[in-house]
Amino acid sequence: YRRMLGMLRDEPAISTDGVRVHMLANVELPDDSADAAEVGAEGVGLYRTEFLYMNRDEMPGEEEQLAAYRRVLRSVDGPVTIRTLDLGADKTIGRNTGKTSSNPALGLRAIRLCLKETDLFRTQLRALLRASAEGDLRIMLPMVSNIQEMRQTRHLIDELKTELRREGLDFDSQLQVGAMIEVPAAALAAPLLAQYCDFFSLGTNDLIQYTLAMDRIDDEINYLYDPLHPAVLQLIRMTIGAGNAAGISVSMCGEMASDKRYTALLLGLGLTEFSMHPASVLEVKRAIMNADVDALKTRTREILAFTDAQAYREALETLSQQLV
Ligand code: PEP
Ligand code: MG
């Protein structure tokens, strides 16, 4: 079975009816980039930068970050989407980072924290800009919930471009900046948010947490974690629709993309860019290569219009078995 999957490594993911799907890898630790290359990932859809900040007293400087970003660009072919620091709630760096919030998942985390601690953010953005001179690097912002966060970040990036130009340092002037869609507000406002984004990436781990008001790290309520909840599927559908209408790409980098039980449904919702842990890439690719996307779209549209809750659930369960 593993050998058979291995044979898929260099094949493009094309469905039986000719839809080309892009298979990207998530990189959480530096070694994952080598694994991504090994399974033939067409790029990195999510590079989590938290590891650079973990278990140390000093924050990583511009040169250290630049070296790490250059390394991933060199080790993987295709675009590399790097997420700016996503700290807070479930993501800690092993030391106290200030005041404890009464509600960390809803508090000063991710892009909110970066826009407050602008020195920290500037250092990372400068490193990202400089690395962009050497490959197809894209910047992705975590936990965006409004347009202002996009505008502020873009403004900061413009300032830093001027600064780098003055210093004679290279960067890609066309560098793409996009948002993770992982807060319901971002999905609901996606048509407007798209005006400030070069791409969207669905972060279903948080999108499910926030939509269903269930803490993703609380074991006592993990039974509430439900990617098939109609509210979750509507938000995914709206995000893909808004991205398509605005002509920007939409990928999914949450765990849902890596689970082949959801591949048929996601293709049916129109997803054409999947990003996941390297270990799942070949399996999901195989499922995609067995899929008839046009038929899945028709079926998915029908199911989402069901008004009978029982029938809705059963039809989704049946769909989830289709490509497994
Ligand atoms: C997500 O929220 O779906 C995601 C991809 O990011 P993380 O799991 O790092 O929060
Ligand atoms: Mg997230």
Image (spheres, rainbow, N blue to C red):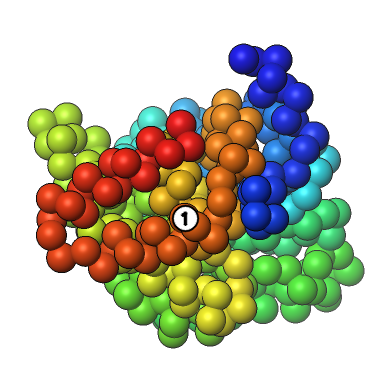
Residue appearing at x 62%, y 61% in the figure: 139
307 relative position to 195: left or right: left
Report the number of discs.
1
Residue appearing at x 73%, y 53% in the figure: 79
Q: Position of residue 15 (x, y in %)?
A: 64, 49
229 relative position to 207: left or right: left
Label 1 CB less than 8 angstroms from ligand 1: no
Q: Kindly identify which residue carries mark 1.
A: 296
Image quadrant in which you'd find residue 248: bottom right
Q: Position of residue 55 (x, y in %)?
A: 47, 28
For residue 58, say whether it is visible: no
Image quadrant in which you'd find residue 111: bottom left
For residue 41, say whether it is visible: yes
In terms of depth relative to the viewer, which is nearer, 148 or 295?
295
Residue appearing at x 54%, y 60% in the figure: 294
Q: Position of residue 258 (x, y in %)?
A: 48, 38
228 relative position to 32: left or right: left
| Callout 1 secondary element | helix
306 relative position to 60: left or right: left
Q: Is residue 274 above or below residue 140?
A: above
In terms of depth relative to the viewer, which is nearer, 312 or 109?
312
In terms of depth relative to the viewer, which is nearer, 270 or 293?
293
In terms of depth relative to the viewer, which is nearer, 284 or 191?
284
- Amino acid type, callout 1: Leu
Q: Is residue 125 above or below residue 41?
A: below
Residue appearing at x 77%, y 38% in the figure: 11
As drawn, the residue found furthest toward the right would be 168
Q: Quadrant of the N terminus?
A: top right
Crowding at mark 1 (Cα within 10 Å: few <14, some 14-19, many 20+): many
Q: Position of residue 192 (x, y in %)?
A: 44, 84
Q: Is residue 115 above or below residue 216?
A: below
